[in-house]
Image (cartoon, grey):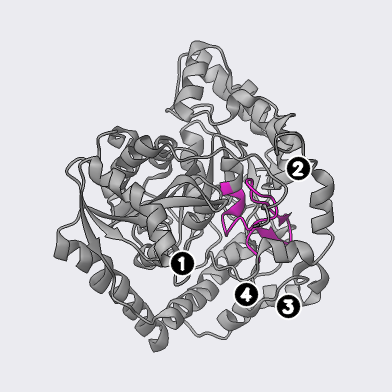
Amino acid sequence: MATDKRSRREFLRSGAAGLAAAALLRSVEGGTTDIMQQDPFPELVEVTIAELQARMRSGRLTARRLAEMYLERIRVVDSRTRSVVEINPDALAIADQLDRERKNGRTRSMLHGIPILLKDNIDTADRMLTTAGSLALIDAPRPKRDAYVVERLRKAGVVILGKTNLSEWANFRGQRSISGWSGRGGQTNNPYFLDQNPCGSSSGSAVAASANLAAAAIGTETNGSIICPALTNGVVGLKPTVGLVSRSGIIPIAHTQDTAGPMTRTVADAAAVLGAMTGRDREDPITSEGNKRAEKDYTKFLDPNGLKNARLGVVMVPPRQNPDAFKAYYQPFIEKIRAAGAMLIDVSFPAANVSQERLDVLLYEFKANLNKYLAARGAKYKTLEDLIRFNDENKDRELPLFGQELFVQSQAKGTLSDKAYLDALAKIRKGARDDGIDAIMATHKLDALVGPTVGSSWAMAAVAGYPSITVPIGLRDNAAAGMFFFGKPWSEPKLIKYSYAFEQLTKGRVTPTFQPALPKKA
């Protein structure tokens, strides 16, 4: 989930966290913070996976040295952003093994020796914890096996560097959630302005990628939890078609919408990571279809001229407040797409009042899916009901800032055979798929859809279970902005092609400077 009803600024006002943040930061000449004067290994800032791989192939860099450099950046830089909750104690040993393989002439993939961070709801069968940010799972048994996506990444030669913070339980606990906060990890901070909301729930993964704390990070999404934090923290976020990437070993919300995906600084890096994540998982039968549709190498779709002759539907959903300014800001980016040879058709989706049905589907599926996960994990707290009791008994640590209303509502729901659930699922899928994305694309004979990265668009793609990608385009009023490409299932190759071509035209990614606070408007 990506719902957020309380800003980071409001959170800071509520306690000592604001004083701690202020104490950590000291402005220097030119408006940057002291961290910019003490930035360890600046050669890693904005470096790409391809560039790192070239350095390792040439012998100028080893996997161990690269891991050490990123670990030092985490130690120094993340004292401000607080995006990483745990370092993998085996990271350097893994890097050493990969260096030995390279020395002996074996390179597993384009990700061989590349350090990546994982969101703390993705199982690892190692010495790290997997908690979804909750103190209830701190003492839980380690998962018996890696999440399948982790198996795939390890097979590709990735160095799992650590775990990132998240909005606790992937932002599906309370109605007044705080994005980027968990009982385990505390508050993750936006790398542009540390007092601002980093969005959720893959907050830590987005912030870590943006702050150059790893080559890439893995997030998860149910309803905007890759796209929103990627947008807010100025990185690329790629949400795959549900079923392209296995869901097994990932602490769930809703099986009809859950998926993991890469969060990176460039589209090329996202494409490289996505190829390593796919594969057929016997524990997740939906991946049988995904495996048939998957590409082994998504980087082959990185075409700088990829927008030529594309037929794209433009989805412009301006806010009620200052809609003209919104349109004026984004229109030049739309014109760049047109100038690159794309045919653009303005489209709009029919209004549908299905917010309650969307929530009901998540509430029903969360209870069923989480109970199944907890039972298999063998944790002390084996059901959602147990977690509700744990939170009530530990209110000072788990509920000091917001409650667990969604937990309670989910617990009250019946089974997945209930007519109310089946009707709600059918209604939202018809709205998002049959009468939504499918209908618009068929009517106008579109290859994909594009527009500003806003909630109504990512919600449509998320509910449908269809792929999407957001690309940073700069800062608008001191907030990161992005362009959103989405389309029909299994259209990742097209979306990568279009978004990469757009990225090469705009080069909109802005390196964070870790300002302590958003400037006040005059």
Which label lies toward us, 4 or 1? 1
What mark, if any, has residue 322 been given in the picture? 1
Q: Earlier in the sequence, mark 3 or mark 1?
A: 1
Task: Name above or below for residue 265 compared with residue 63.
Answer: below
Q: Earlier in the sequence, mark 4 or mark 1?
A: 1
| Kind of residue indicated by mark 4 | Leu
Q: Name the residue tied to disc 2.
A: 79
> Residue 398, image x and y in percent?
75, 68
> Residue 140, image x and y in percent?
70, 58
What mark, if any, has residue 384 been given in the picture? 4
> Real-space Cα distance between discs 4 and 1?
43 Å
Which label lies toward us, 1 or 2? 1
Residue pictured at 59% horizontal, 35% vertical: 214
Magenta-drawn stretch, dominant element (helix, strand or loop): loop
| Kind of residue indicated by mark 3 | Arg
Magenta-highlighted residues: 178-206
Q: Nearer the viewer, residue 375 or 42?
A: 42
| Kind of residue indicated by mark 1 | Asn
- How many neighbours does mark 4 have within 10 angstroms: few (below 14), some (14-19), or many (20 or more)? many
Q: Nearer the viewer, residue 37 or 478?
A: 478
Side (left or right) of 427 relative to 307: right
Q: Earlier in the sequence, mark 3 or mark 2?
A: 2
Residue pictured at 42% horizontal, 66% vertical: 323
Q: Nearer the viewer, residue 387 or 226?
A: 226
